[in-house]
Image (cartoon, grey):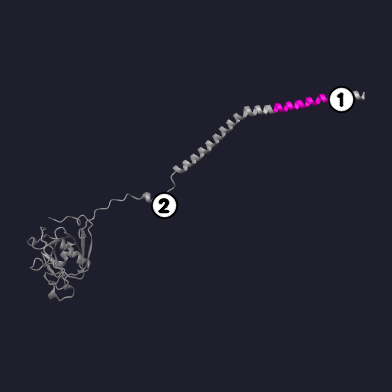
Amino acid sequence: MKKLLTIALLAAAMSCAPKESTTTSQTTETTATAATQTTATVAPSDTAATATAATTTVTTATTATTTTGTATTTAPPAPDKKTAKTTDKKPVEKEKSVSSNPYEGKIAEIHTEKGEIDIRFFPDVAPNHVKNFIDLANKGFYNGIRFHRVIAGFMIQGGDPNTISGPPSTWGSGGSPNKLKAEFNSVHHARGIVSAARTNDPNSASSQFFICVADAGFLDRQYTVFGAVTKGMDVADAIVKAGNGQELPSNPVRIEKVVIRDAKTPEEKAPTPK
């Protein structure tokens, strides 16, 4: 009985062992197959999804990068102070044409004890006389000189360096070293005209000049007109009055200084009268 029981148990154990092994094997195979099938069937789909997702992610990342890059590239940087100043600057105007003649467009401010007389020049008709006066003025030649000759209803005359410290007997005979050739022109000797004084020699003018306080047409084309008063004829009249009717005043009005500057107003820039 024991043997039979042992054999029976042994047989039962043997019959169970293969089935269990087979089941395991089948299960393993099935699982492997399933895994293989799943892998074979599902993997491509997952890979595509993953690839799509990755592509989307990459695209998104790329888009984000592109967007960021675009934003960085297209957005203008905040202007600094220098840029702002440069941007705010007005367009540079074209430079105005400047005459090559340094004696054109100049004004002489004659500062006297009675006030200021401004003179504009006519370099187109008397270039050498204009140059001579401006050059002397810039050197301070006229500073301290007096209007030594005054005739009411005619003119006031000055420009003689002898009137600074020389005796009255010499007043009217002095001048600068340069002697100028006559530049007689068609400008009429009207009130306010500035002309060159001279001796009987037409080419003897130097530093002396006179300002007409009334019309003096009888001097036309015999004396060189080189300028005209633009301001201060009331001062010229005051100088006449200060002479007390004397042609050679005992205490003539003194020129403190002469300043040469550029013409500013339309009157100062006006053309030479014809």
Residue 236: give x, y in percent of width and height: 16, 64
What amino acid type should be assigned to the residue bearing mark 1?
Leu
Disc 1 designates what residue? Answer: 9
State whether residue 115 appears in this view.
Answer: no
Query: Along the line of sight, which residue is nearer the eye, 101 or 255?
Result: 101
Q: Which mark is residue 81?
A: 2
Badge 1 density bin: few <14, some 14–19, many ≥20, Cα 10 Å: few
Quadrant location of the N terminus in the rendered image: top right
Q: Is residue 102 magenta?
A: no
Indicate yes or no whether the magenta region holds residue 20.
Answer: yes
Residues in magenta, as a range = 8-31
Task: Write the residue at 51% across / 38% down.
Answer: 62
Picture layout, residue 118 above or below residue 55: below
Q: Amino acid at mark 2?
A: Lys
* Residue 244: percent from left, percent from top: 13, 70
Determine the secondary structure under disc 2. helix
Query: Count of labels shown?
Result: 2
**Distance from label 1 to label 2 (Cα)?**
103 Å
Res. 172 mark: none
Res. 61 visible in picture:
yes
Callout 1 touching callout 2 (CB < 8 Å): no
Between 196 and 19, the one lying in front of the other is: 19
At which x and y percent is residue 201? 8, 67
- Judged from this view, the residue extending furthest toward the right is 1
Residue 228: image x %, image y %?
16, 60
Which structural element holds mark 1? Answer: helix
